[in-house]
Image (tube, rainbow, N blue to C red):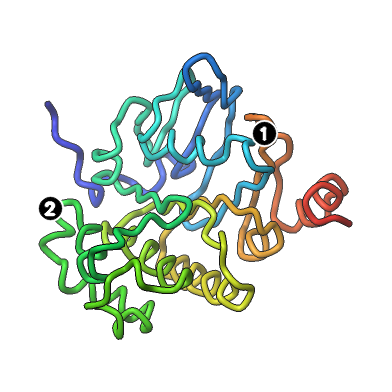
Amino acid sequence: MTSAPNPLSLPAQANGGPLLELSNVTAFYRDLQALFGISLSVNAGEIVTLIGANGAGKTTLLRVISGMKRMGAGSVRFAGQDVSSVPAHEMVARGVSHVPEGRQVFPFMTVKENLSLGAYTPRARAGVKRLLEEQLALFPRLAERMDQLAGTLSGGEQQMVAIARGLMAQPKLLLLDEPSLGLAPKIVEEVFEKIQEVRRSGITMLIVEQNVVSGLSISDRGYVVQNGAVLLEGTAKELLANATVRTAYLGL
């Protein structure tokens, strides 16, 4: 079995192309088709947000990208290489971290233990002390909770743990699935401020978000996913002004 390439040796963009590129991706759950020929791209340094109703296929799409779900057909390219058949653990080594919907922290482990598990790759494990310090600088509230069981934290604090755990792997691309789910408006604002800080550190992000205004307001571009296919795409500003988006997702 060949080892995954060192992500530091991979070009951020191959021949000027996108960091991530999906072409005609399909996916199935047994006989039920969930994705129908989705094509999209994310350029290095961008935040791109996927919006759409529950069941539209957005979470499935993230799972395909991170290697957690096999696609039926199509291709996924990351950092200039075809990763269509690369399993999840190798995708982490290549520079893709997936923060799942619902946070999914380990409730009976401490905050420190949850974060340390994020340092999955040998390179990350070698620098785990520095990486922990970086996450505590980004999320100072967690510094007071390091020895606390993650399951006893508030929803917002658990989301911070989930994002910080994803960052412990030193990703080039961070996949965020519903980071505002179940959070109070004030906490949503704080979480999105932290996401912008992550972006300023040079990490590219692809976000699935039901809160259309919050998601697109920090994004460069977006895609509207409906019934497993891309319905619309454009800059964040274009999508926020689009009549279909305003009617279907903003109630205007």
Q: Please name the amino acid that badge 1 sits on.
A: Val
Mark 1, Cα crowd under 10 Å, few <14 / some 14-19 / many 20+, is many
Query: Which residue is drawn at the image coordinates 48% and 55% (left, top)?
Result: 205
How far is mark 2 from mark 1, CA to CA? Answer: 37 Å
In this image, 119 relative to 84: left or right? left
Tell me if residue 232 comes above or below residue 43 in the rendering: above
In this image, 137 relative to 200: left or right? left
Q: Which mark is residue 44?
A: none
Q: Please name the amino acid that badge 2 sits on.
A: Pro
Which residue bears the numbered disc 1? 230
Tell me if residue 182 comes above or below residue 141 in the rendering: above
Which residue bears the numbered disc 2? 122
Image marks 2 and 1: residues in contact by CB distance under 8 Å: no
**Which quarter of the rendering shows the C terminus?**
bottom right
In this image, 224 relative to 197: left or right? right
Which residue ends up furthest to the top in the rendered image? 31
